[in-house]
Image: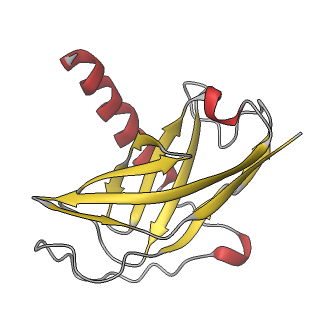
Amino acid sequence: MFVKSLMLFIVATGLAIGLSGCGGGDQSPSSNATGAATGAIQGNLQITGWGPQGTKAGVVFNAQPGGNAALWIRVNKSLDGTVATIDFDSHPLTAAVQGELLTASVPSSLYAAPGTYPLHVSAKQGASVVQSNDVKFVVGK
């Protein structure tokens, strides 16, 4: 179990590094530094950008060196110091966190069938858990 957790951490960290420059099209989120607050998460957590916003069923998106699909989400505040997940249609994905940017590897089973799937971020710091708004990931035919 430890080895599996370590491998997930290594993959997620690699995704954070590989996707740190991601932004996209008309959603180019600002890269304002908020001055890393390390206290409890305050206020309303909002997704300000994400990508990609969809794919075709079974088609790997944002392919990583290992062949996995990956997505990124930018939120309105730094989540440094938190344990965060990106919830893809209620399946929690371990997220690498770098300030306001989260990245995660997405298993192919989650985008195998056409549909519109909700995404949101859950961030935990101590006993406090905050959830963001939902956005959509569209899997076409």
Residue located 22% across and 82% down the image: 35
Indicate the quadrant containing the N terminus: top left, top right, bottom left or bottom right: top left
The location of residue 65, given as percent across then percent down, is 56, 29
Residue located 80% across and 39% down the image: 114
How did the renderer colour the structure?
Answer: secondary structure
Indicate the quadrant containing the C terminus: top left, top right, bottom left or bottom right: top right
Residue located 50% across and 61% down the image: 73
The answer to whether 14 is drawn above or below residue 24 in the figure is above
Q: Residue furthest front?
A: 90
The answer to whether 100 is drawn above or below residue 54 in the figure is below
The location of residue 42, given as percent across then percent down, is 22, 80
Camera-side residue: 128 or 79? 128
Quarter residue 58 falls in: top right
Camera-side residue: 30 or 48? 48
Q: Residue furthest right?
A: 141
Camera-side residue: 141 or 72? 141
Quarter residue 119 falls in: bottom right
The location of residue 87, given as percent across then percent down, is 46, 49
Looking at the image, residue 75 sits to the left or right of residue 141; the answer is left
Residue located 41% across and 78% down the image: 76
The answer to whether 141 is drawn above or below residue 100 in the figure is above
